[in-house]
Image (tube, coloured by chain):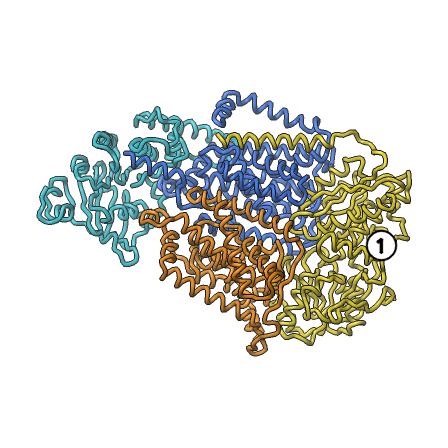
Chain colours: A cyan, B orange, C blue, D yellow
Amino acid sequence: MGVLLQTKNISKYYGGIKAVQNIDMQVEEGEIFGIIGPNGAGKTSFFNVCTGNLLPNGGEVWFNGKNITGMRPAKIATLGVARTFQNIQLFNFMTVLENVKIGFHTHEKTNILDAILHTKRYKEDERLTHEKAVNLIERLGLAKESDNLAGNLAYGVQRRVEIARALALNPKILLLDEPAAGMNPIETKELSDFIKQLRNDGHTIIVIEHDMKFVMNLCDKIMVINFGKKICEGGPDHVKSDKEVNEAYFGKGTTF
Amino acid sequence: MYLLEQLINGICQGSIYALMAIGYAVIYGVVGLVTFTYGEIIMMGSFSAFYYFILFGDNLFFALIAGFITAAVVGIVVHKVCYQRFLDAPRYISLICTIGMSMFLKNFATIVFGSEMKGMPAFFAGKFIEIGTIRVGYMQLLIIGVVIALSLVLTIYLKKTRMGMKLRAVSQDKKAAALVGINVKTTTLIGNCIGCGLGGVAGILLGVYYNSVLPTMGGMAGLKAFSSMVLGGLGSISGAAIGGVLIGVVENLGIALTSSGLRDVFAFLLLVLVLVIRPQGLFGKKGN
Amino acid sequence: MTEKLKTFYNKRKTIILLVLFAMAIALPFLIEKGSVMSLIVRIMFYIILASSLNIINGYSGQFNIGHAGFVLIGSYTLSILAQLGWPIWVLYILAGVVTSIIGLIIALPTLRLRGIYLALVTLGFSEILRLIALNWTGLTGGPMGIKGIPAPWFFGLRSTAPHNYYFIVLFFVIICLFTSYRVINSKVGRAWMSIREDDHAAMSLGVDIRKYKAINFMFGAFWAGVGGALMAPFYTFIDSSMFSLDEGFNILSMVIIGGQGTLIGPVVGSVVVNLTTEIFRFADEARLLIYAIMIMAMMWIRPQGLAGTSRSVIANRSLGKERGTFLKKLLKKKEVK
Amino acid sequence: MLKKVLVIVMCLSLLVGVFAACGDKAEEPGEVAGVIKIGVAAPITGNFAEYGKGFDVATQMAADKINAAGGINGKTLELVVMDSKGDAKEATDIARKFTEDSEIIGVVGDFSSTCCMATAPIYTEAKMVQLSPTASHPDYAGMSEYMFGVMGRQDAEGPFVAQYLAAKYLGAEKLAIIYLNNDWGVSAQSNIVKGADEIGLDIVALENFVDGEKDFTATLTKIRQTNPDTICLVMFYNEVSIIAKQIAQMGWDDVQICALGPGTSEQIIELGGADVEGIATSTPFYVTESDPVAWAFKTEFESKAGFTLNVHSACAYDAVMMMAKAIENLGDNASREAIAGELASMKDFVGITGPIIFTADGDVFRKYKIAQIEDGQWVQKTDYDYAD
């Protein structure tokens, strides 16, 4: 099991505000890695640097033995990094099936001429994409929503569609930004099981959350960020007992 | 020396663009929608002054007030028809609506006011100051003065007064403004009226300066105002003014060096270049 | 109502299309009057132009309001080369190719611009192109325009009579709609729509936004060029005044009145707009007044366009920061929870 | 619900309109006894509406006058006016409508050369005369034997302006030209240059502008560098008054202004006031009180149109009169085709704008007078024989 995603000394500033400061992170293949921290700690900024949506002010991001710092998000996605967004960014006016089909974008080889002439390549692509998309939708239990507009779905279902869309990329690593936000306990439990299932299927997963319980139950390894700095890293038990973490999260004097 | 002369010509002409752009900047800032009716607002202001002069005699100051009021009233109509309903909708809807409104006002003016060019009374005729061999007329000085005064007064108004504060709040975030108890509907309406009123004033000075009032005068005027504002940076009042002057200068220097027929080519080339290099405009904030 | 129509269409797709095609072929034999045919041909020009603009505005959510510039390139390319004796049939396509290259040249530096900025840049380019056409007398005839543009040979006929030219235009209308349909229902079309809906999400899925925006511009420009090229031999004379900004706005209103983001929308739009201006001819000087009122009424009653479904309302989101009614709905949903 | 009803009503009204539009033309072809129809195509809306309005009023006046005098050979003259918006595409549709309406025997219009040249092939195919009051593109009238232009080509006026107005009358030695960049302006300008070259008049500056321009200071500053003693303005009344004003404002008083295009437009004086004093112009016609027919026309036009008479409207009036005369001359032989021949061979027509005799192409070579503004009024300075 090698290191899949690694950041070296990453910093990101907005004007004078230091959103992320010198964060090192190593995510190994096959693990579920949690990033936690209070609101505004810089989790999402850090995430966006990893996926190329933001350029870091300093430091490097390595993925699968390749320096991906400064690459465009689309390129990084092609290498096998998929993500979801904190505030669900589905293609609202497209159906669930179409949403998932776009996930297969990087696997299709059709160009505009193929599309116009309906060449072999187009037909092959469309057939495969359709098959795979339908499979994926079934696997995620979304079959009956397949032809509904993504925007009309219930919140929890939208989360799942977003994950399905990301999975369509067949990514080596999947980054989930607050997947449990706005879910009720039952949905959260389902999600947790689902993520574990994904790991068993061979995906490496990074999860951002501020729901401690969710993370503690799910992750193999956890990194805690506060005010843009890494304050702790380790297994759930290690993090639970860390004094600094408890202070950051619950104020001084409280313990878990 | 020759280029200096052309530079001064450019500043004078640019000040007219600036005058028009200020009103546009207020409208865009507060309402947050692109409008293609602004040129016709300018035209309506111009016509209102034309009739004011006929009915009540040649008093420029009162004509400006009348023009401001007329344009603001037209602004209310435009607001009710083209903006209010579409504030939350995709912007192209109100944009098309303003194209329709512009067509309506232009044809309305052609039918009611007549299609031929009309003149304005002359003010400060034959009065000028001389800089070297160049004469700058009082009218030009008045326009430059009005531009500077308006930029200052508007900036102070927006920064210091209660209403100004509300306008700025609405321009930054309508939802947040509504949450803190600002009546967004009325505030955008007032902002639009102020912007349109300024457009009316610009129209009058434009009509008097060039001595021409036409139903079709709005098209190019509105376009130049729009371009000046975007060049300066969206919603920035002094930016819009500077953008206007800049376009004027570039156009006139372009004419000096090549041919007069290429005037608008220079204006739009400048615009395209600036936007390509600096998409937020010269003085706009990034991430807008 | 639209939903019912849609299911009806899907059920009997082949038959409906065949009937439509047969009607289109029969049309010139049923209509005797050249003036009516000429109006129909004009409508069909605008179907191509509006469809091409719809590709750009409706499908990838970019905002082009200077479409007349592309039409100009197409028209002039054909007219200039036709003067040199190039075969017209080849020139129809070549004009499209040249226009799409110009489209690429315009698109490349403006790929990172969005919404109002892109709108203004396209408008600026359109005006620049028109002024160049007006001033470059050696190439374009300048204000004198180009006259005597020949029509192509067509089954032994060389005539710009609308009854004959109709078939040429019909051919291109069908090809235009057909190719658009195929492209939209492919990887490329899905990528365009994903950009329109949410460019960040599209990026995260590996969609190369710049590339697909550029392709989108080129495809739209290609058909605008073909449309422009088709017009030149029919009117036999062109000059720069035919490609003013108003012309661009005109095409834009057709797209939006018809409903952007749908294939049929621009078709409906050009039919309705051209018929209306023709019908209100009796109103004399008030003609455009009525047209203007109609545009505004349309935006009040049916902002998604006559043929538009709610899907296309949002089609041009990049122009607005707000997510429109949809966001409201979303917010409400969250509150309920 | 309301929306649906509205949509349905809109669609229905559209459909009704379509049938109405198609239906009213489906009448039986053939001549209605006692009526002669002439088509008039003019830009009644759009950017040239100003001129279209003038066309509308002037042509109607001509028809009224003819009918008041008993019509054409006892038949009533009826005008079918259609709005082309100045758009070549609409103009061709109108042309097709006119040619298909067998009652319409000839057409007066359109205003712009763009429209006229786009419609020329259609009229030619139908062997129908298009008598344009104003189209002055040098190639227009030559496009076919059915195309005629009343305004007159610039081949004659250009050299006249250079050689007689500028050089002889004003004594110019260094001439600067500012011209409107359209087909008319360009051909006028090139003919002035040609005329100037013939007599060795020095052209020191040649500048153009796009229609709608209002600020000429940059152009004027540029021209002033070249020290011309005379500026020739090739444009219409609105720009002439604006330029005169800006020249005065620059304090440039050692330059003489002459103009080609506006004729003796009253609007120049109205708009320009003291600044236009001394402007000299060539004009094919000059309406004075000494010419009662023309003067009556002028007063009537102005009361009907609400603005002062311009040369375009006068030409439109003459165009209708001329076509009526051709039809009258032909008597019972009047047909579309015959009108062309009759117009081409007509040698004795004198209209408001002076005698009109077509060349082989179908153009008019006019003779010109020189008029100048003195004390806020146009004063005729030379008569038609100045160039002889």
The local secondary structure at tag 1 comes to strand
- The residue sitting at the front extreme is B56
Residue that mark 1 sits on: D351
Q: How many labels does the image show?
A: 1
Which subunit holds the residue at mark 1?
A: D
Task: Say which of C83 and D356 sits in front.
Answer: D356
Image coordinates of residue D314 in percent, x first then y, are: 78, 54
Image coordinates of residue A119 in percent, x first then y, are: 50, 30
Q: How crowded is mark 1: few (under 14 residues within 10 Å), some or many (20 or more)?
A: some
Q: Quadrant of the C terminus of chain D?
A: bottom right
Image coordinates of residue D272 in percent, x first then y, are: 67, 66
Image coordinates of residue C180 in percent, x first then y, are: 52, 35
Can residue C156 be spotted in the picture?
Answer: yes
Rendered position, D364 above or below D255: above
Drawn side of residue D249 relative to residue D361, left or right: left
Rendered position, D231 above or below C190: below
Drawn side of residue C238 relative to residue B228, left or right: right
Task: Say which of C295 and C134 sits in front.
Answer: C295
Q: Splitting the image into 4 quarters, where does residue D168 fall?
A: bottom right
Task: Say which of B248 and C144 sits in front.
Answer: B248
Can residue B271 be spotted in the picture?
Answer: no
Q: Residue at x 25, y 31 (%)?
A: A198
Q: Splitting the image into 4 quarters, where does residue B223 fall?
A: bottom right
Drawn side of residue A13 relative to residue D147, left or right: left
Task: Say which of D9 and B31 sits in front.
Answer: D9
Three-letter code for the amino acid on which mark 1 is drawn: Gly
Q: Which residue is drawn at 70% across and 64% down?
A: D268
- The residue sitting at the bottom extreme is B132
